[in-house]
Image (cartoon, rainbow, N blue to C red):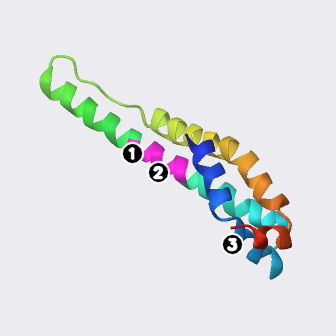
Amino acid sequence: GIFTIMTIAVRERTREIGLLRAVGAARSRVSQLFLGEAMLLAGVGGIAGLTLGFAIVAAVTLAFPAMPARISPLYVVLSEGIAILIGLIAGLLPARKAASLEPLEALRTE
C-alpha cells in the first residue's frame, strides 16, 4: 500500500533528500514533503474509489429501476477524509526516516 510506496520513495530519493538537507532544508520541511505526497496519493486513490462507486451505483440503478441507489454526500466527504487520514498515517514513518537522514551520509549512497 501507501506505506510500502513511500518507503521505497525514500530509499530511491536518498541522494535528493541529502541534497535538500545540504542546501539548508529543515528536517520538518523534508518530512512535510513526504507526508504531503502520501496524503496526495491517498486522496487520488480515494477519488478513484469514489468514481468507481458512483459508476457501480449508476449501473445498479439502471439495472434495477425499482430499487434506486443513492450515495449520501456525507459518505463521500467522510470516505475521502478517511482516505487522506490513512495516507497521513501511512506516511508518518517514511517521512520521519527521510527527515532523519544526515546530508553527507545521504549524498554518499548509490
Residue occupying image coordinates x 73% and y 69%: 17
In which quadrant of the rendered image does the C terminus lie? bottom right
Q: Is residue 39 left or right of residue 102?
A: left
* Tags 3 and 1 touching, CB below 8 Å: no
Question: In the rendered structure, does residue 28 fall within the stretch colored magenta?
Answer: no
Q: Which residue is mark 1?
A: 48
Q: Please, what secondary structure does the residue beneath circle 2 have?
A: helix
Image height of 18 relative to 5, above or below: below
Amino acid bearing label 3: Glu
The single residue placed furthest to the top in the displayed view is: 66
Question: In the rendered structure, does residue 46 fall within the stretch colored magenta?
Answer: yes
Amino acid bearing label 2: Val
Q: Please, what secondary structure does the residue beneath circle 3 have?
A: helix
Q: Which residue is mark 2?
A: 44
Q: Please, what secondary structure does the residue beneath circle 1 have?
A: helix
Q: Is residue 50 left or right of residue 101?
A: left
Q: Quadrant of residue 107?
A: bottom right
- Figure label count: 3
Residue 94: x and y, percent?
A: 72, 50
Image height of 40 relative to 73, above or below: below
Amino acid bearing label 1: Ala
In which quadrant of the rendered image does the N terminus lie? top right
The magenta region covers 41-48
